[in-house]
């Protein structure tokens, strides 16, 4: 069964104990209702907008209750436990997936902006830091000996300062420059053809 949230409006300022949001609840491609959470630790609320929505939500509730329970492993704070799946929890998972996608997109946008005038190092989709230039990487590459300058900068100023798990994240530096500068292809992000 296809259950989606669309037009999600998330408010991080109101998200105290849970994520504060409102969204349209679509089931099997039909706008069935709305879902929301006030952000104060309560359960997600959802309700239908018409009779068709009522019937679709009932089917979605039945479907979700047939899904496997969520498993939580043992931690220092609590023993392992499971929570039976239901539509309310399924909605929470959809909100979490949406926020994770949005966070990854925000990270990606910041990364692309940063790599214009810097060698960017970090952990993919997690964090990064910069070795900045006054000129853009593209301008440096156009200069006489620009590639050599980047190779030497990476070898002498970037590689020695990499922290465990960090790699060069730039996708705007030609791979042959990165190969020449790095002792291993594990030290930079490989650009894959799409």
Image (cartoon, rainbow, N blue to C red):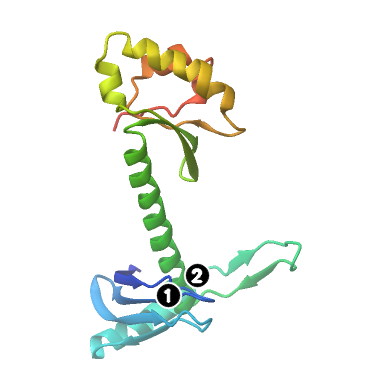
Tell me the distance, in whole angstroms, between the alpha carbons under discs 1 and 2.
7 Å
- The crowding category of the residue bearing disc 2, from other C-alpha atoms within 10 Å (few below 14, some 14 to 19, many at least 20), is few
In the rendered image, residue 109, in percent from the top left (x then y), is placed at 33, 46
Given residues 39 and 30, the one toward you in this image is 39
Q: Is residue 97 above or below residue 115?
A: below
Q: Quadrant of residue 49?
A: bottom left
Q: Residue at x 45, y 64 (%)?
A: 96
- The crowding category of the residue bearing disc 1, from other C-alpha atoms within 10 Å (few below 14, some 14 to 19, many at least 20), is some
Q: Residue at x 42, y 75 (%)?
A: 63
Given residues 123 and 89, the one toward you in this image is 123
- The label number, if any, that marks residue 63 in the structure image: 1
Tell me the residue that label 2 is attached to: 67
Which quadrant is home to the N terminus?
A: bottom left
In the rendered image, residue 118, in percent from the top left (x then y), is placed at 38, 31
Instruction: Give the tally of numbered discs.
Output: 2
Q: Is residue 2 above or below residue 143?
A: below
> Residues at badges 1 and 2 in contact (C-beta under 8 Å)?
yes
Which quadrant is home to the C terminus?
A: top left
Q: Residue at x 76, y 62 (%)?
A: 76
Q: Quadrant of residue 193?
A: top left
């Amino acid at each position: 069964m296809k259950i989606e949230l669309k037009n999600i409006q998330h408010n991080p300022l109101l998200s105290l104990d849970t994520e504060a949001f409102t969204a349209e609840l679509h089931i099997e491609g039909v706008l069935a209702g709305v879902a929301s959470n006030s952000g104060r630790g309560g359960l997600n609320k959802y309700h239908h907008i018409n009779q068709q929505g009522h019937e679709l939500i009932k089917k979605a509730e039945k479907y979700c209750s047939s899904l496997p329970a969520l498993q939580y492993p043992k931690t220092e704070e609590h023993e392992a436990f499971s929570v039976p799946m239901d539509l309310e929890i399924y909605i929470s998972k959809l909100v979490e997936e949406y926020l994770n996608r949005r966070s990854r997109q925000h990270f990606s946008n910041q990364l692309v902006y940063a790599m214009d005038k810097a060698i960017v190092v970090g952990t993919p989709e997690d964090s990064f830091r910069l070795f900045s230039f006054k000129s853009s990487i593209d301008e440096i590459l156009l200069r006489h000996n620009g590639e050599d300058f980047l190779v030497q900068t990476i070898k002498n100023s970037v590689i020695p300062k990499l922290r465990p798990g960090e790699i060069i994240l730039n996708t705007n530096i030609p791979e042959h420059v990165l190969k020449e500068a790095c002792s291993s292809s594990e030290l930079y992000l490989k650009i894959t053809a799409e």
